[in-house]
């Protein structure tokens, strides 16, 4: 198979469809090697920068996820706080109603006491008049 390929290439070169390979000069090879070495150094530097940027990106993502978890925790705490405030407000309203009822009862008892005191004075006066 390899010989068939070599034969096909030789025929194409014979008809000048593809040019015959020329050997490169040592100077051209040295220039190409230097250019290759420069590109290799450039790739190594770029790779190093990419690795540093990747590490930085991982750190930023980790910080972002931590902040997101903190935000969710704060949001849940705020929600729980609002629920607790609503419960306490309901309790305060119940206590205020109980206080109003107790105040009304106190006022009614005070009125009854005033009435009883007045009746007691009248009875005392009547008893004094009756005994005198």
Image (spheres, helix red, strand yellow):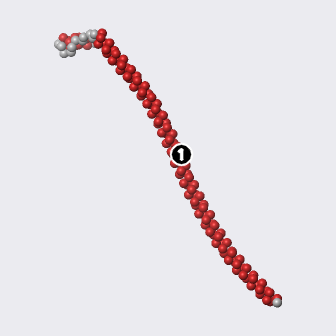
The extreme left residue here reads 15
Give the class, few, some or many, for how many residues have Cα within 10 Å of label 1's Cα (few <14, many ≥20).
few
Residue situated in front as seen by the camera: 101 or 5 = 101
Measured as percent of width and height from the top left, residue 97 is found at 61, 66
According to the picture, the residue beneath numbered tag 1 turns out to be 73
Instruction: Report the residue at 34% width, 15% height from top.
Output: 34
Relative to 68, residue 16 above or below = above
Measured as percent of width and height from the top left, residue 20 is found at 22, 12
Residue situated in front as seen by the camera: 8 or 107 = 107
Measured as percent of width and height from the top left, residue 62 is found at 49, 36
Place residue 26 in its image quadrant.
top left
Q: Is residue 81 left or right of residue 112?
A: left
Relative to 29, residue 130 above or below = below
Place residue 23 in its image quadrant.
top left
Q: Is residue 108 left or right of residue 35?
A: right
Quarter of the image that includes the N terminus: top left
Relative to 47, residue 57 above or below = below
**Residue 4, visible in the rendered structure:** no
Quarter of the image that includes the C terminus: bottom right
């Amino acid at each position: 198979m390899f010989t068939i390929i070599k034969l096909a290439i030789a025929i194409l070169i014979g008809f000048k469809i593809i040019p015959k390979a020329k050997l490169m000069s040592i100077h051209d090879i040295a220039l190409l090697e230097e250019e290759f070495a420069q590109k290799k150094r450039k790739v190594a530097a770029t790779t190093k920068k990419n690795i540093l940027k990747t590490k930085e990106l991982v750190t930023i993502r980790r910080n972002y996820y931590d902040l997101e978890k903190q935000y969710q925790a704060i949001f849940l705490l705020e929600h729980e706080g609002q629920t607790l405030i609503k419960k306490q407000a309901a309790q305060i309203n119940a206590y205020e109603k109980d206080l109003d009822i107790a105040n009304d009862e106190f006022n009614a008892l005070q009125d009854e006491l005033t009435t009883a005191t007045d009746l007691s004075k009248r009875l005392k006066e009547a008893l004094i008049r009756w005994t005198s």
